[in-house]
Image (cartoon, grey):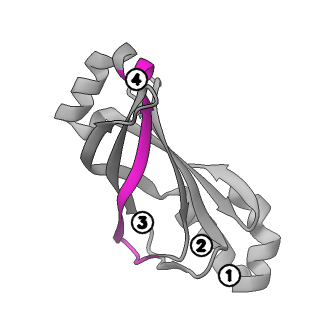
Amino acid sequence: MLGGIAAGAAYYFGKDKVKGYSQALENLSFNLKSVNNISFDGLGGLSLKADVQIVNPSNLDLSIPGSMINIQQIEFFTKSGQLLGTANTNINNIAISAQGTKLLQNIPVQIPISQALGNISELLDIVGDSSNLNIATTIEIFGKQFTL
């Protein structure tokens, strides 16, 4: 999946690190840690702030300076695959140690009220247990977009 970044990454990091970075990036996971400041946004939806933890299960330190890697969007889905809300982000300068985590705090999330009400039972399940939430993250790497 991330093979398309090989040329630019190989130039910057060297060929040996490219394979490790590609595998580490593919294995990152994103977990909801907390939700704060839930309110009606006045536009027919809810807004909230979410704390999302990035987990690096690999044995490689991920330290990518500048905007070579940019987390552009985080989407939140129910277990059944229904989109609940979206956070449009611009997060770069990513550094996560091997077997480590990084907490992204106060990410603004928009939830259209129709999506919240249409999935109320699953939404309540998520409030009770955040493992009932699936997260898809769009990352731009050397100018190409990938969804993890």
Q: Which residue is mark 4?
A: 113
- 77 or 59: which is nearer to us? 77
The residue under the point 22% across, 25% down is 124
- Mark closest to the chain's N terminus, 4 or 1: 1
Q: Which residue is mark 2?
A: 20
- 91 or 5: which is nearer to us? 91
Residue 70 lies within the magenta run: no
| Relative to 9, 63 lies left or right | left
The residue under the point 67% across, 60% down is 140
Secondary structure of residue under mark 4: helix
**What is the C-alpha distance between the residues marked 4 and 2?**
42 Å
Q: Residue furthest left?
A: 128
Secondary structure of residue under mark 1: helix
| Relative to 33, 22 lies left or right | right
- Mark closest to the chain's N terminus, 4 or 2: 2
Q: Residue furthest front?
A: 42
**What is the C-alpha distance between the residues marked 4 and 1?**
48 Å
Residue 19, position as x, y percentages in the image: 66, 71
- Mark closest to the chain's N terminus, 3 or 2: 2
**What is the C-alpha distance between the residues marked 3 and 2?**
12 Å
The kind of residue on which mark 4 rests is: Ile
| Relative to 138, 85 lies left or right | left
Q: Which residue is mark 3?
A: 56
- Against 101, residue 33 (above or below) is above
Q: State if disc 1 and disc 2 touch (CB < 8 Å).
A: yes
**What is the C-alpha distance between the residues marked 2 and 1?**
7 Å
Where does the magenta region start and end? 95-116
Residue 16 numbered mark, or none: 1
Q: Quadrant of residue 107?
A: bottom left
